[in-house]
Structure formats: C-alpha cells, structure tokens
Amino acid sequence: MKHEVTRGRGATLQIEGRFESVARERVDDGWGTADEELQPFKTTVTVEQAKSVIQRHDSPDLPFDYSLNAYRGCEHGCIYCYARPSHGYLNLSPGLDFETKLFAKPEAAKLLRAELAKPGYRCAPIALGSNTDPYQPIEREWQITRQILEVLAECRHPVSIVTKAALVERDLDLLTQLARDDLVQVFVSVTTLDAELARKLEPRASSPRRRLQAIRKLNEAGVPCGVMVAPVIPFLTDAELESVLQAASDHGARSAGYTLLRLPYELKDLFKDWLATHYPLKAEHVMSRLREMRGGKENDSEFGSRFRGNGLFADLLAQRFRKACERMGFNLEGRPLVTELFKSPSRHGQMDLF
C-alpha cells in the first residue's frame, strides 16, 4: 500500500517497533476523521543522561574497536539507515519518530574525558558516525561533536568520522590540528549524484554537490577525506558506483569504500513502503535483486557478508569497485592513525612531583 509523503521527511510509515505489543493503523470510522489533516511532524530533542559514551566493539568486519555517538535518531531522515530499528528500544517508531524525536548527549565530552583518564584505558581510534550522523542539523545548535573533537585534539587521540553533512567544514580548525599528526580520517558518504533521488532518499542531508565540495575543502586543508559509496542500492543507485568514485576523485579523495544496502528488522517494511511510494515500477526489481545478493533473504546479518552480500551480482559489484579504485588510484597511500601520541587528560596541567 502506498502512503503519503511528508515534506522533508524520509520515512513514509510511522511503523511500530518490534517490541510493541499493539499496532495502530489509521482507518475510516465513518465520521470523516480519516480525511482530517494531521499535525505536521516537528523535530524535538530530548536530553539523554548517559553514564558512558564510548562503545566497544569486537565485530570482525568493523575497522574500529571504539565508537561514540553524540545523538540517538537522525534528522537527515535517510530511508535506508540501518540504525532506525534502534529507536524501538526507546518505545519509539523506527519510522518518522527516528527522524523527528531525537536525543542528545550534552555531557558527552565530559564523559569522554573521564573515560580517557581511566588508568586502564587503551588508546585506539574512536569512530564518530557509526550509528547516527555526528553532523546532523541539530549539531549546529548543540555542538556536541565539536566539544568531543576538542577533547580528542587536546589528548592527541585518533578519530575517524563518517558523515553526509557539509557541516563538517565548520570544524576544520580542529581537524587540521589532528591531521598534522595523522590523528584523523574523514569519509563523506555519497549515495548518488542525482539530486532528485537524493532528496527522496536522504531528505535533510547535504546535497551531493555540497558533499563533494566538502571532500575538496577538507583535502585542500590537509585533512585526509575519502568517500563512502554507501549504501549501494540495486537498480536504484548501483549504476552510479563508478561516477560517484570519479566525482570524489575529481574533488581530491584518495580513499574509498562501499557497502551494500542492509535491511535489518523493521527497516525492511519501511524501505519497501518507500519504494512503493516513490518508485513503484522499480520496487519488485530492487527487492528481487537484493534477495539474490543476500542468499535469498531480504537481509543478511552474518559477519563477512553483511556489508558486501554474496553471489554473482555481489561479486560483480565488488569487481567493479576494485577496478574503479585501481583506475583512479584509490586506497594506495593509506596510513594507519597514530596512537602513540595519546596523552591522558588526567595528566594535563599537573606539575611533576620530582
């Protein structure tokens, strides 16, 4: 069933989370209420009183051990976001609630400083943007990501960032400071170069043109910034793989990565409804090809294949990516982020005893 599109929002459904025991659906009760105009969705931000902010990971297919997320939910509204189902843990919908009912951690920098100061802390790169975008629109006001970077720069701690927001340019002063000691790597996610498609897929993210400009600006300032072609969506964005890589190369990127569309839990229903609403003639083709690349399923959560898929079409996609990277000189000069320069904040500003 096709649903209405809410201007500036990604999801076409206010679907119930998988932990809810009751599902609600709008129906005509004979009183004409089904035709009444609903109140527009407004973004609200709730303060979250977190006890810690560094998440530790042991997944074999993640390139980092630590991550930090300043926000829950994301106003960018990307329909494909694999983090949407996490809103179910808050008794909220992974649909429109995920992009309108946000949670901020204003004490994140303070908590980060305390965790870095612990005697047993082992320095390893911290990933910002592993779940929700650290530079989503509310960051302009809350500036939590900037406060986090200030702590990391002070402690000379390595950090990696993934974003689809040109707002990352705001923090060039801190990023260039980190880059001088090989302490930062930025990836800007570019899903498509088609502005109309991007407006439907990721309605409140920066336009593809602005993201490419951010890649250029960061690299010109000495901050290593690559491109993530993520996610690749069969029959919708997969034909653009080479053109996105070429555009990023033209704007100074020298590293690249990609992931195949993932549809965990409620995201399957959200994405299929979005397809039926915006691209009804392509909907079945997209899902059929995705199932072929996911071993007959709509989602594959297995380590080693969840980001790339498997089968003939997944292998062809991997070959296309590899050959394009070889042709454009991507991923040839990568250097690991430095951890040896880390200084615990507990030692800052203290005089030597002897």
Image (cartoon, grey):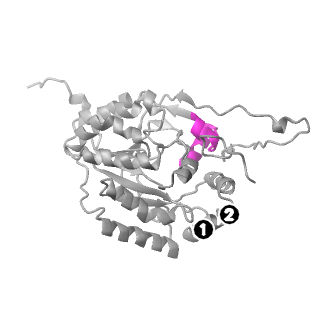
- Main SS of residues in magenta: helix
Quadrant of residue 229 in the image? Answer: bottom left
Q: Amino acid at mark 2?
A: Leu
Residue at figure coordinates x 61%, y 52% from the top left:
267
Front one among 91 and 213: 213
The answer to whether 196 appears left or right of 208 in the picture is right
Residue ID for mark 2 = 281
The residue at 49%/43% (across/down) is 205
Residue 193: x and y, percent? 47, 55
Q: Is residue 97 magenta?
A: yes
Q: Which residues are magenta?
A: 83-101
Secondary structure found at label 1:
helix
Which quadrant holds residue 128? top left
Name the amino acid type tagged 1.
Answer: Arg
Residue 21 can be seen in this image: yes
* Residue 13, placed above or below residue 191: above
The residue labelled by disc 1 is 291
Q: Is residue 211 left or right of residue 79?
A: left
**Label 2 neighbourhood size at 10 Å, few (<14), some (14-19), many (20+)?**
few
